[in-house]
Image: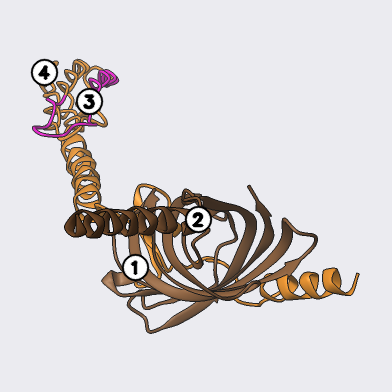
Amino acid sequence: MKRWALLLITFAIPFSSPMACGGDGCLRNSDCPSDMTCRAAVCELETPATANGGEGGEDSTPGTAGSGASAGSGGTGGSGGTNEAGTAGTAGSAGTAGSGGTAGSAGASGSAGTSGTASDAGAGGASEGGAGGAGGAGGAGGAGGAGGANDTSFAGAL
Amino acid sequence: MLAEGATVKLWLAVVCSVLGAVAMTHEAKAEELLMDGNFGVGTGLEAGDPGTGLQWRRARFRVLGGVDLRSDEGPADALGFRAFVEVEKRASIGAEVRYERWMARNFGVWADLTGTVAPETLFGGGFGCTAIIPFGKKFGLFIEPSFQALPLGSDTPGDGVLIWALLSAGVRFGL
């Protein structure tokens, strides 16, 4: 019985050691998962540089696309004719897809501008032309749609 | 006539000598191989420099088994084979071969070559001793402290040396 107790104590000592087997750090490569390696007591990916670089490139592309889309805002309506309402501005054309942007989608076409309100006849007030169609939004890298140019017409001369 | 008598005496002496020599020889006995089995567990301390200075920690818990082979003509010398599995974290498989010198019936010292083969490789050598607490003629408990240095393989910390200071124990039985 005494022998068994001694044996138990002998084996209990290393198990109660504060030095954990591995813990968060590593000492051997086999302490880490199979796709990682032990460097400076820390598990790291075996091929860290190339993967991160690729992700960085993708991040930069959508930024460019956003700027392209903003260019697609519709042109402001032409100044209204005196009597006739200005015709609505043509919708901005959809932005073309940006080059190289993998995630970017083509911008949606701008909505048509609302027609300008007719001014009072003879009043000579210049009615304001319809607002130009909004440019396509979100085209990845795409050049923004050109703003719709309003036809401005002049209704009755002053 | 006289010459013939001398010749007969000579032949008689030769025959008697041969017969005497044959009669004195013992029956030749074939060399017999003695085999002991071992099964146990072990752990201890493990050290290495992964690039941040020497670090010690508790060694992975391992389960081991093997055999010791000796000749009955020289039972003090033995050749031992062990296989072990480290069962903490990622399991690894290893083996060792050792030369044992038994200083007494229940105490021996040894030197070995050891290493792991999967999932990473590790090779080195070391020394240790074995003490046996007998329980009967063919059964006993063994306690085995050892020290190993492993400088080779893909599992070394920062291409340095991995050190094991282990204590193993288990059962030993005659086969």
Disc 2 designates what residue? B26
What residue appears at the point 47 percent right and 48 percent down from the top-left corner? B30
Q: Is residue B36 left or right of residue A37?
A: right
Q: CA distance from mark 4 to mark 2?
A: 136 Å
Disc 3 designates what residue? A107
Q: Position of residue A33 (x, y in %)?
A: 43, 50
The kind of residue on which mark 4 rests is: Ser
Q: CA distance from mark 3 to mark 4?
A: 30 Å
The kind of residue on which mark 3 rests is: Gly
What residue appears at the point 14 percent right and 16 percent down from the top-left corner? A155
- Nearer to us in this view, A22 or A80: A22
Q: CA distance from mark 2 to mark 1?
A: 46 Å
Q: Secondary structure at mark 2?
A: loop
Label 2 crowding class (10 Å Cα cut-off): few <14, some 14-19, many 20+? few
Disc 4 designates what residue? A153
Q: Is residue A139 above or below residue A48?
A: above
Disc 1 designates what residue? B124
